[in-house]
Amino acid sequence: MKKQRSESHSHTYTKSKNSMVKISIVSFLAIGIATSLSLVLSSSPPKSYYHSLYKSNSISDNASISHDLYMLTRRPHVAGTEANAQAAAYVLSTLASYSINSHIVSYDVSLTYPISRSLVLTQPEQASEQLPVVFDLRQEIYDGDPYADAAREVLPSFHAYAKSGTVRGAVVYANYGRVEDFKRLKEMGVNVTESIVLARYGKIYRGDIVNNAFEAGAIGAIVYTDKKDYGGGGDEGWFPEAKWMPPSGVQVGSVYDGAGDPSTPGWPSIQGCERLSDDEVEKQGNVPLIPSLPVSAADGETIMRSVGGQVADAGWQGSKDGPTYRLGPGPGILNLTYTGKKAIETIQNVIGIIEGVEEPDRFVVVGNHRDAWTFGAVDPNSGTAALLEVARRLMKLEKRGWKPRRTIVLCNWDAEEYGLIGSTEWVEDNRQLLASRAVAYLNVDCAVSGPGFHASATPQLDRLLLKTTRQVDDPENSSQSIYESWVAAPSNSPTIERLGGGGSDYAAFVQHIGIASADISFGSGYPVYHSMYDDFVWMEKFGDPMFRRHIAVASVWGLLTLQLADEEFLPFDYLSYAYELQEKAKELEDEISDRGTRLAPLFESIKKLKDAATKINQERKAMEEKRVWPWMLKRDKVKVREINDRLMMAERAFTDAEGLSGRPWYKHLIYAPSKHDDYGSNYFPGIDDAIEKAKSLSTPESWHLVQHQVWRVSRAVRHVSQVLDGELT
């Protein structure tokens, strides 16, 4: 489901020579001599040898990745279908061929599928000579499409978990369907009540578009792929001649606004488990209460031509060769019917385990999802092919004597597209073990959608990410590293985004149980997202013709995994967290300082976090400096374990058992999705929710609740510092 990249919180690292690690000549020589002697005295090469080998051209394989992607994307494979079960079997057998101990974990979850849908556009009575427009709602198969036969298996375009029903109403155009767009309509005097909203994809999660329409009084929603955003321009054309979405292309997807099986919120959907009824699911507030449909650019434009009223603002307009966008309501009238089927279907997560030899009870979890709305060459199977490449290279290392210090868990999730279901059910099923033993989670969704490296992470992994990208060649220019190309981007600095949005499978790990996580990819969105045209042909022609970007993703992903699995001390740095929280707390103070809300407790807690992060870094450094001659000194394994446990468990302390107010599944007090955009997020989500409510109510009591949320975050940050400090008060 990887989100189409939009604004989210992030941290930018400035390019500075002073930020580079300086090693003295004496230390460099000592370490070099020690390494050389260790090679002589040790029966096997050091971990660094295997890490260098992992990223070498001698074991990477473009052809293997291309083959895996081709095999995974021959048919559409929606969650719960036989085709997706076959894809699971392919992943399982491939891991087994690499001698990786693998198995399938199944869950029985509530999914929805389309039974029927129709959309008819009529004009008012005074224009009755115009015949109704009956939309066929089909994505067209192009001439020469090698997937023409398989394309007939593509499900009719729909919104998963959309409400069934028939509605009739005048059309109101609502731009991208954001809260501010509906606010603007109100300011313009446009009545949304009893209307069917026409909104375009591109800025927020589709489920929030539908919910925002409902909150504004609409009875239905049509969401389309605007040519301006997805169709290119000029004489380029569209797929298969160009990368752009064809006029009949439709972006399908889920409109469920939660995580995991809607019928088992907070507990795993194992066979025979407790389930909520449909009415109880509705009361949870995460499924839409009005019907909706996705439509193509061509159909959206036809509907737009029927809309009159005021001309929309310049920023609301479409492409230059399209109609003038107006707000309505009407005069066009839409008749929308959607009927869906709910079913309990079995989904399959594929789990592979490479057991650690020194700390087998510490897990480095690596994951990507497998299910797709159609063929899924970009989303998600570019990531699946990269995952299998990581597994293949790790097998090559094992054959040369490498064994990980900690256990590596390779996960291929199911039903992510419906609402992060496979990963969420597994996390809920293994909550206690993961909370006590998981070191980190490394996610890749769409591994490749185009050029340009992108990374998101919890801040303690920033330094590791920057270090790793310095070690891997840029696939566009092998004379420089990914890091150097990253720095050369327009921002002139590498920007690491944060994991507050609900766009992929990291959500349960970060936002529910508090595990340090990262997500990487090449590309920042692509025009044929979630459409029938996201296939192997598109990838081979436009996404990654030589599969070099796939190789680069697998190299960065695997090196991150190896360093987390093999380094004696976990490569975490919580100073990054402290500095960033301080910066965001100052921004928050600027926003609400005139409301009487005290942020002093938060600043005090952040200072303690900074002190604790500095202390544990010094402890680690002191132990490392004693080990220039590691084979001559007795290792204090208990102390190493104790430091690592503090580093591992500190992220958990950012969570609160009660969760966010009104959103109890989200327990992380620093990162969670925005209430009005599941893809977006703000720092301190509980405080942010409370501020929004207080600004609306403007009462002393509501601002008192903002202060309460500040105290909650302050306590959480203080608990993190206590975990890092490692001593009782």
Image (cartoon, helix red, strand yellow):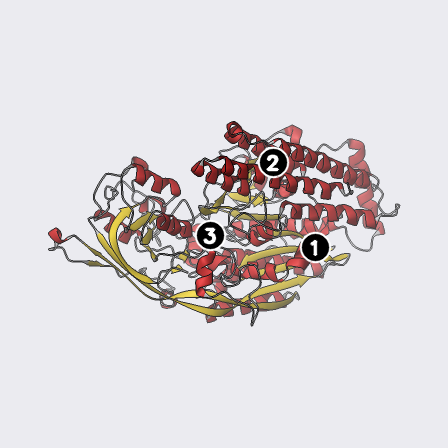
Find residue 17 and report its horizontal and vertical position in percent.
64, 29
- Most foreground residue, 524 or 29: 524
Q: Which residue is drawn at 63% across and 63% down?
A: 352
The disc labelled 3 sits on which kind of residue?
A: Pro
Mark 1 lies on a secondary structure that is helix
Vertical placement of residue 406 versus 687, above or below: below
- Most foreground residue, 318 or 693: 693
- Most foreground residue, 583 or 498: 583
- Indicate which disc, 1 or 2, sits on the residue closer to the N terminus: 1
What residue did someone put label 1 on?
Answer: 436
- Indicate which disc, 2 or 3, sits on the residue closer to the N terminus: 3
- Indicate which disc, 3 or 1, sits on the residue closer to the N terminus: 1
Find residue 69 and report its horizontal and vertical position in percent.
50, 60
Q: Residue at x 62, y 49 (%)?
A: 514
- In three-dimensional space, the C-alpha distance between marks 2 and 3, rounded to whole angstroms, equals 41 Å
- The label nearer to you, 3 versus 1, is 1
Task: Using a 10 Å C-alpha cutoff, classify the residue at mark 3 as few (fewer than 14 neighbours), some (14 to 19) or many (20 or more).
Answer: few
The disc labelled 1 sits on which kind of residue?
A: Ser
What residue did someone put label 3 on?
Answer: 545
Find residue 317 and report its horizontal and vertical position in percent.
29, 40
Q: Residue at x 71, y 61 (%)?
A: 355
Find residue 624 and report its horizontal and vertical position in percent.
80, 41
Which label is found at residue 693? none
The disc labelled 2 sits on which kind of residue?
A: Leu
In the picture, measured across the screen, residue 249 lies left or right of residue 82, that is left
Mark 3 lies on a secondary structure that is loop
Residue 616 picture quarter: top right
Which label is found at residue 581? 2
- Residue 243 visible in rendering: no
In the picture, measured across the screen, residue 289 lies left or right of residue 12, that is left
